[in-house]
Image (cartoon, rainbow, N blue to C red):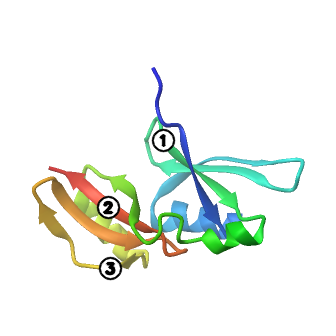
Amino acid sequence: MPHLGLVALVVRDYDEAIAFYTGALGFELREDTARDDGSRWVVVAPQGSRETGLLLARASTPEQESRIGGQTGGRVGLFLNTDDFDRDYKRMVAAGVTFEEEPRHEPYGSVVVFQDLYGNRWDLIEPG
């Protein structure tokens, strides 16, 4: 059955991106493989997730560099689902993650907008 395997996210530096996603967001490093062209194949994903992960792709051209932090034109473009909103929100606050608002409770669940280290906007969401 088809499923979404990876979503590429353009980053400035592999190691700083790995540190943020594994440290501040609690993701696991699934793969970090050097490639012949000097790039790396770096995949991170939320702990315990089975399907979709992030491919951290270091920008290699000026055009790609211009997209770092703005791949979705300023919209929330990534959604991190959780089964315990309060636990993950508090952990992320303690890790220094930038939140744009106070948590809110919507008909579809508990949600708060945060930014990754590059300014990409995410929702942390516990579906209702």
Q: Is residue 111 visible?
A: yes
Residue 124, numbered circle: 2
Q: Is residue 13 visible?
A: no
Which residue type carries mark 2?
A: Leu
Local packing at callout 2 (Cα closer than 10 Å; few below 14, some 14-19, many 20+) is many
Relative height, residue 127 to residue 76 (above, below)? above
Q: Identify the element where label 3 is drawn.
A: loop
Which residue type carries mark 3?
A: Glu
For disc 1, the marked residue is 52
Task: Work out how far the residue at label 3 is from the one at label 2, CA to CA, in angstroms.
Answer: 11 Å
Local packing at callout 3 (Cα closer than 10 Å; few below 14, some 14-19, many 20+) is few
Among the two numbered marks 2 and 1 on one chain, the one whose residue lies closer to the N terminus: 1
For disc 3, the marked residue is 100
The residue closer to the viewer here, 127 or 28, is: 127
Residue 45, position in %: x, y?
51, 49
Identified at 48% across, 41% down, the residue is 52
Among the two numbered marks 3 and 2 on one chain, the one whose residue lies closer to the N terminus: 3
Relative height, residue 28 to residue 86 (above, below)? above
Discs 3, 2 touching: Cβ within 8 Å: no
Residue 97, position in %: x, y?
42, 75
Among the two numbered marks 1 and 3 on one chain, the one whose residue lies closer to the N terminus: 1
Task: Work out how far the residue at label 1 is from the one at label 3, CA to CA, in angstroms.
Answer: 25 Å
